[in-house]
Amino acid sequence: MNGPGKAQRPTLVSFSGIDGAGKSTQIEALCQCLRKIGMKVELIRFWDDIARLKFLRESAGHILFKGDKGVGTPDAPITRKDKNVRSWGMTCIRMILYFVDVVSTRDAVRRALGSDADLIIFDRYCYDELANLNLRNRILRIYARLILKITPVLNRSYLLDADPFEARARKPEYPIDFVHLNRAAYLKMSSLSNRITVIAPMGRDEVEQAILQYTLDDLEYSAYPRKNGGCASKSMA
């Protein structure tokens, strides 16, 4: 990016939220908009690029709990059994794995800060793991606070809130009762930290414009889209 005001280090943002909240859609829209106005954008996928022991996690739900593999769609719903299994044994295993992932996240953020990109997007973050815990439990809230203390703070972390029924209709993978619990855990987790920007449930275009405006403000490029038009100009109206 050769536009005005290029920062020396990239701006880092993350997207979190329940399954079906629209994270992938909004990430794609933001990438397209910013690339259209000449910015360099990179994407880091938490489950692919950061999380450790992925084979163990993926196989546990299928082998131990007989859950389905893959991604659920409206035409082909599935029944996953992984993060919705909340026994104390599985919770203890998660607590170990999540600590390992925080260490991996710190390395990933350190590498990202050396990139020449304008913006680096984390598709999910440590917050998504903490939301898998029963944060109504005092011990797990203490654990979550400790993990938050060592989780790298990004320029902005988005939590896309969503209606559980609508989210599950888009991505039918877990029982609706768990989707409600998961949403409540995300909101509770966000209340434990002042680092998270909660995007309330809105239409897709409204969410897109809100995220774009926040991101442009963080990038300090607000004047650039006004002069050059393009998709960013919609959010300036």
Image (cartoon, rainbow, N blue to C red):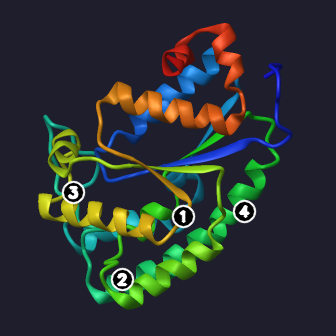
Q: Is residue 71 above or below residue 222?
A: below
Q: Is residue 7 visible?
A: yes
User: In this figure, which residue is indicated by the disc labeled 4?
Assistant: 107
Estimate the spatial distance between the alpha carbons at disc 4 and disc 2, rounded to whole Å. 25 Å
Callout in the foreground (2, 1): 1
Q: Assess disc 1: are there few (<14), some (14-19) or many (≥20) residues with their C-alpha within 10 Å of its C-alpha.
A: few
Estimate the spatial distance between the alpha carbons at disc 3 and disc 1, rounded to whole Å. 36 Å
Q: Secondary structure at mark 1?
A: loop
Disc 2 marks a residue whose amino acid type is: Thr
Per the rendering, the mark at residue 91 is 2
User: In this figure, which residue is indicated by the disc labeled 3?
Assistant: 68
Q: Assess disc 4: are there few (<14), some (14-19) or many (≥20) residues with their C-alpha within 10 Å of its C-alpha.
A: few
Per the rendering, the mark at residue 88 is none
Estimate the spatial distance between the alpha carbons at disc 3 and disc 4, rounded to whole Å. 32 Å
Disc 4 marks a residue whose amino acid type is: Asp
Disc 3 marks a residue whose amino acid type is: Asp
At horizontal 64% and vertical 35% (from top left) the residue drawn is 217
Q: Is residue 2 above or below residue 116?
A: above
User: Looking at the image, which is closer to me, 93 or 193?
Assistant: 193
Estimate the spatial distance between the alpha carbons at disc 3 and disc 2, rounded to whole Å. 20 Å
